[in-house]
Image (cartoon, coloured by chain):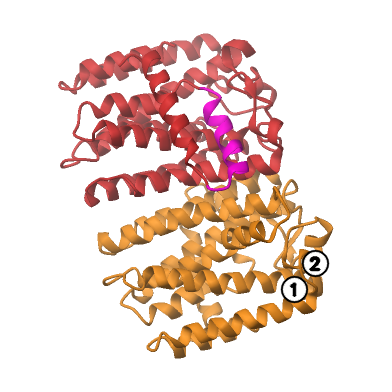
Chain colours: A orange, B red
Amino acid sequence: MKLEKFISFFDKKLSDHLCGICSYTPFREIISYTPLVGGKRLRPYLIWELSRLTSFGSDRALKTGIAVELFHSGSLIHDDLPPIDNDDFRRGKPSNHSIFGEARAILAGDYLMLYPSKVISSLDLDHRYKERLMNLWSDVSLQVVEGEFADVTPSERTEELLSFIRRGKTASLFGFCFAAPFCVDDGSKFSEMFELGVDFGEIFQMMDDIKDATSTLQELGKTPGKDLSQDKLTLLSFRSVEQAEAMVEKRFYAFCEKITEYRDLAGELEDIFRLIARR
Amino acid sequence: MKLEKFISFFDKKLSDHLCGICSYTPFREIISYTPLVGGKRLRPYLIWELSRLTSFGSDRALKTGIAVELFHSGSLIHDDLPPIDNDDFRRGKPSNHSIFGEARAILAGDYLMLYPSKVISSLDLDHRYKERLMNLWSDVSLQVVEGEFADVTPSERTEELLSFIRRGKTASLFGFCFAAPFCVDDGSKFSEMFELGVDFGEIFQMMDDIKDATSTLQELGKTPGKDLSQDKLTLLSFRSVEQAEAMVEKRFYAFCEKITEYRDLAGELEDIFRLIARR
């Protein structure tokens, strides 16, 4: 399925899912706002497409994709809060706290970040596979928060810490998306796919660092130039834009080389990755 | 084990556990601060004592108790934040954000609330029991956030909503503590114990509502009289202190009646509950 088609399909399923998400209706509206505001849906798309290569199944892929997207939305809600990134815009629309206030936004973020455990623990899946998936999920969700913490308050300005931040706040979640469909069967590709996803996520974050410095509000959907104004540790703390672009290109080609090793997967993967990475 | 003795034992184990909790050391300090500031440790104590009545085992009881206590600490960190309860004190010490700032406190709360899934999914426990425990945990953790949301922004001032808040933000977590040790074997008492724990938690919260109005900062460890000054929905929104005290006493005796039905458990349960409820 092409990404554009997937986005319409996924958005409908996500909206249906959110209708039943929480028993207190005034909270449901606030929980649902950010996930439904839009987004590229790359994480669920990766799970969906990769699941065609395993026996994970489309229903489980969709549910896992919804879980990951909701977690991601929750972490963005917290990220946008005034004490953290203080951003009034997200995906081109007012951020959660600028509509509902900080108290509600904090709790909506909490709910969305905790919710995936419920989805994963309820999957109709053999217990061995579910355990594999749940263990990875619980590690990854913590790594995202750790990475975000180091991003917000870096203890030193080194490339080593930048790499830790990038892996934590962004790449580990992509690792989960790559690995999830491979939790089934003998799971032999599970760790391998996680590392491949982390690699992809690192490239994705490096591109994001560049875009923050070179895009407009309209292109970005959030306030541009914030990394610099907030003195964030990014790729551009150590490289010029030109150097950074050359570095990303090199990493991307190395990544494409790496996936040709996966003979049975290479075609599908390369299509997806080129499509996404070139956006 | 008496509660006082358990507290020393547990605090040591908790402190050891926190030494290995997160790979980014500047974050570990902030994550560890609130859990180690103290507390009555009632939730882990209940799991610990009740586990003597099943084959759950003391090691699993301790780990599950640590998980619940860390979640509880995380939710208190968020609860104390300026946009929510705005409390500079917790357990008689400065609250997390008043030492480390709001950004760090938000992320420390996130980490602590997500952490239990990792503990539970890593328990050395038969998959059927673990699945039972994990499903309950994921429901309960969401109920706590929902209850907290309704507490912070009640949509109406009714006893029905008060009851929803009480069950969500407080009682469901006690329900989990009662049920957890009974996830093993045929699990026949699992739901029953959950409801019993919810009942206990409701009485606990009703007592807390009264204490907020009648205690000093020293007795309470946090700012007293905040429910009234923040116009919170509590038992005292509908009852005088005297009426509320009579109501709690009645519910407590009904609770004690209820546990005498559990012939094999009654002795231990009654000791624990009387001890705690009378504090």
Identify which residue is drawn at 69% across, 78% down: A247
Q: Give the quadrant of residue A181.
A: bottom left
Nearer to me, A247 or A209: A247
Q: Quadrant of the C terminus of chain A?
A: bottom right
Q: Position of residue A28 (x, y in %)?
A: 55, 53
The structure residue drawn at horizontal position 47% and vertical position 45%, both measured from the top left corner, is B115
B21 sits to left or right of B231: left
Residue B236 placement (x, y as % from top left)? 56, 19
* In magenta segment, residue B28: yes
Q: Amino acid at mark 2?
A: Pro
Q: Residues within 10 Å of mark 1 (few under 14, many from 20)?
A: some
Crowd class of label 2 (few under 14; some 14 to 19; many from 20; radius 10 Å): some
Q: Chain of mark 1?
A: A
- Relative vertical location of residue B239 with respect to residue A37 in this rendering, above or below: above
Q: Which residue is more in the foreground, A120 or B170?
A: A120
User: At numbered mark 2, what does the secondary structure look like: helix, strand or loop?
Assistant: loop
Mark 2 vs mark 1: tell me if same chain: yes
Q: Range of the magenta residues?
A: B23-38
Q: Where does the image place residue B71, in percent across and percent down from the top left? A: 48, 38
Rendered residue at 47%/69% (across/down): A195
Residue A72 drawn at (x, y percent): 57, 61
Q: Which is more toward the observer, A278 or A115?
A: A278
Quarter where residue B152 is shown: top right
**Magenta-colored segment: predominant secondary structure:** helix
Image position of B24 with respect to B76: above or below = below
Which circle marks residue A224 in the picture? 2
Inspect the image, locate mark 1, and give the three-letter code of the amino acid beneath it: Lys
Say which mark, if any, is on residue A211.
1
**Lower position in the chain sequence, tag 2 or tag 1:** 1
Q: Chain of mark 2?
A: A
Q: Nearer the viewer, mark 2 or mark 1?
A: 1
